[in-house]
Image: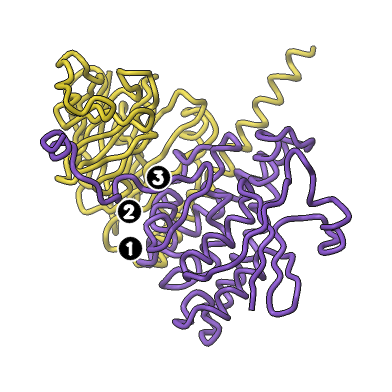
Chain colours: A purple, B yellow
Amino acid sequence: MTIRFYNYVLSGNCYKFRLLASLLAVEYESVAVDFHPGVEHRSEKYLRLNPAGTLPILQADGRVFTETQAMLVWLASKHDKSGAWWPEKNSDAIVQVMQWLGFAARLSATVGELRLHSMLNKDIDAAAAKAGAIKALRELEAHLVQQQIRGEQWLGANSPTVADIACFPYTALSPDAGIEHDAFPAIRQWLYAVRSLDGFVTMPGIHELHEQRDEQSPAAETKTS
Amino acid sequence: MTTTPVALARDLPVQRVMRAQVDGCDLAIWRGISGQVQAWENRCPHRGMRLSYGFVRQDSLACAYHGWHYNCEAVCHYIPAHPELQPPASIKPVTYSVVEHQGVLWVNTRNEAEVPEFPEDSIGIRSITFDCPLSVAFEACLAAQLSDEAGLSLSPRQLGDAPLILSFGNQQQADSVLLLFQPSDLANVVIHVLAHHSYSVDGRIGISQWCESVRRQAELNHEVAMNAGMECTHE
C-alpha cells in the first residue's frame, strides 16, 4: 500500500515525518509542493485534500492525515516493531509523550512562525512570536535539565520517542529565527543526541555531525594523494 | 582582568564546541577527544567565520566554512582545498588561558587563568542565562528566599568580588548552593549553579526551579526599572 507524502523541503513539520520515516527505514512516495513562492498548498487541488491549507499532508491506509504529530504516531505505531517510539503499553511514558507532542505545537506557533517571518517575510507580530519562542525554549531547557538530574536524556521516556522527533526540528532551527542555542546547554546536549541517532537525515539548517562521519583523517589523505 | 567561569565542564563533552562571552571577547570553547579544553577567539583566521559553528574531529577544531583544521597548539595543520599544502605557521587563532577545576571551566582573556577558592564537594546543577544586567541579577539572587532540603532557610554570603560568587548556607550545611556569575556583554548574565553533592534528585530539581523563579523576578525588576526610566525621560 502506497504511502504518499506531500512535502516541502524547508518545512520543519514536513521534516518531522521525513526524519522519523528515515529512522524507522519506512519508504514512501514524496510529492514536492511549491509552498513558496507558488503557494500551491492553497490551490484548489490541495484545499480539496486538506481544507486547512497546511503542509504536510499524508495519504495512507486509505485516509488523509493533516496533523504532523498524528503522522508521527501513525508511522511509529504501524512501522516500529520495537514499540519504543510510541510506547503505548507504558502508560507513564505515553502520558509524558502526549505532553511533549502537545508542546511541539507551541514550538511551531512561536519559533516556526518567527522563522517564516525571518526567511519568507511572513506578516506576523514578530515581537510576540519571539517572546513566545524564548519562553517555550526556556521551558524545554528546564525540562531537559530535570531529565539530566534524573539521569535521563530524552523528553518522555528512557529512549527516544515521537515526542523527541516532534520537538526537534523547530528547536534545532531556532537560529534561523534569530535565537541561538548558546543560552540552552541542556537543549544543545539533546539536539546532539537526536543528531547522533542511527538513520538521522538532515534538512537545510540542520546539518549532520561531521565529527562522526567515517572519513579518512587529514594526515592519511595527505599521504595517499 | 579576572578569571571568569564560562560553563559547567559536563556541558562540554569531548569533541564539542560552544560559544561564550568574556570581558567583551567572543570565544569558541572546545574539547578534543583527549579531553583537553581550549578557549580561542571565536574567529577563523581565514575568513572570520565563528569557530563555534565548527566541529571537533579528534584533537582538532575545524571551521564550518572551509574546513580548515586547527590542533590543540592552535596550529593550522590541514586545509581541505589544498591537502598537500603545509599551512604557514602564521595562521593561528588567538588563544586564551582556560582551566577546568571542580567541574567548572574558567577563562582569563589577559593572563593565566587562576581559579578562585571555592568550596569542594559541589556538583553542577545547570548554567542559566538571565536577560538583565549583572547588578540586577545579583540583587535578585541576594533577595531570594532559599531553603535546604530539611526546609531550613539558607542565607547568602559573597565569596568573591571578581568573579562574583554567592554561597548559600546555614549552620547545618555551609555552602549548600553556589552561584558563579559570568557577566556577559550581550546585556545578559550567565549564572553557573552548583549544589552540595548530598542533595537528592528532588532537591536538585528544586534548586533548578528556584533559579527560574529568581530569573522571573530579576527580569521583572529590570523591566520595571527600564519602564520607570522611560517615564522620567518623557517628563
Residue sitting at x 69%, y 40%: A116
Q: Residues within 10 Å of mark 1 (few under 14, many from 20)?
A: some
Between the residue at mark 1 and the residue at mark 2, the CA separation in whole angstroms equals 7 Å
Q: Amino acid at mark 1?
A: Tyr
Quadrant occupied by the N terminus of chain B: top left
What is the chain identity of the residue bearing mark 3?
B
The furthest residue to the left: A223
What is the chain identity of the residue bearing mark 1?
B
Disc sitting over residue B199 in the figure: 1
Q: Nearer the viewer, residue B153 or A138?
A: A138
Q: Nearer the viewer, residue B113 or A172?
A: A172
Q: Amino acid at mark 3?
A: Ser
Between the residue at mark 1 and the residue at mark 3, the CA separation in whole angstroms equals 17 Å
Instruction: Give the x, y percent position of residue B121.
Output: 21, 54
**B210 over B157 or under it: above or below:** below
Between the residue at mark 2 and the residue at mark 3, the CA separation in whole angstroms equals 12 Å
- In this rendering, the label closer to the viewer, 2 or 3: 3
Disc sitting over residue B127 in the figure: 3
The furthest residue to the front: A225
Instruction: Give the x, y percent position of residue A115.
Output: 65, 40
Q: Secondary structure at mark 1?
A: loop
What is the chain identity of the residue bearing mark 2?
B
Q: Which residue is mark 2?
A: B195
